[in-house]
Amino acid sequence: MALTDQQIAEITRLTSHYRQKSGAAVEALKMVQRTSRWVSDEDLGAVASLLDMSPDSLDGVATFHNLIYRQPVGRHVILVCDSVSCWIMGCRLLGDHLRRQLEVQWGGTTADDRFTLLPVVCLGACDHAPTVMVDEDLHGEVTPAKLDQALEGYR
C-alpha cells in the first residue's frame, strides 16, 4: 500500500520539528501504523525516502522499537510484560491463560483477527506487576479473571 497524500503531508510536518528529517522516524512509523496496524516493506521504503534514510536504517529503528509492528497484527495487540517484577508476580500464568483462552501462541493472532498476543520486556509499571497492555491501555495487578473482564471491552 502506498502512502496517502495525507500521510506524506503529516510526515513532512513531523520532519519540520527536527534538525535532521530522520529525527521523525519513530513518530512517522507510528503514524503509518495507526492507519494499517503495521508497517509493510513498501510503507517502510516510502517513509525512508521522505526521511532521507535508507530502508535498512529505518528498518533498524523499526525493529528496535517494540511498539512498531513489522508484521500484520490483529485489531488489538496484547502485550504481556515478562520483566523480573512481572515474572515474580505471575506473568507466566497470565501468558498461559491467554494462550489457552485465545487459542494462539506467542506472536499469534486469533482466527477472528481480534487479538495478537506478544511478550514485552518491560512496560515500566513494576509497582503494579503483573502488567498487561492492550493497545495503549495499561492494566496493572492483573489476574486471569481481571484480564478476561478487561478483554471484553475490546471488540
Image (cartoon, rainbow, N blue to C red):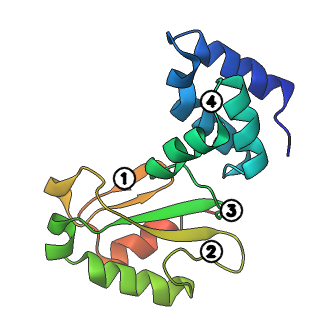
Q: Residue under circle 2? A: 109
> Crowdedness of circle 4 by 10 Å Cα count: few (<14), some, many (20+)?
some
Residue 76 position in % (x across, y down)? 59, 60
For marks 1 and 3, the one nearer the N-term is 3
| C-alpha gap between disc 4 and disc 1 | 33 Å
For marks 1 and 2, the one nearer the N-term is 2
- Where disc 2 sits, the SS reads loop
Tell me which corner region of the image, top left, top right, bottom left or bottom right, holds residue 12.
top right
Looking at the image, residue 47 sits to the left or right of residue 135; the answer is right
Marks 4 and 3: CB-CB under 8 Å?
A: no
Q: Residue under circle 3? A: 72
* Callout in the foreground (4, 3): 4
Q: Please tell me the numbered disc located at residue 53.
A: 4
> Crowdedness of circle 2 by 10 Å Cα count: few (<14), some, many (20+)?
many
| C-alpha gap between disc 2 and disc 3 | 9 Å
Tell me which corner region of the image, top left, top right, bottom left or bottom right, holds residue 91.
bottom left
Q: Residue under circle 1? A: 138
For marks 4 and 1, the one nearer the N-term is 4
The amino acid marked with disc number 1 is Leu
| C-alpha gap between disc 2 and disc 4 | 31 Å
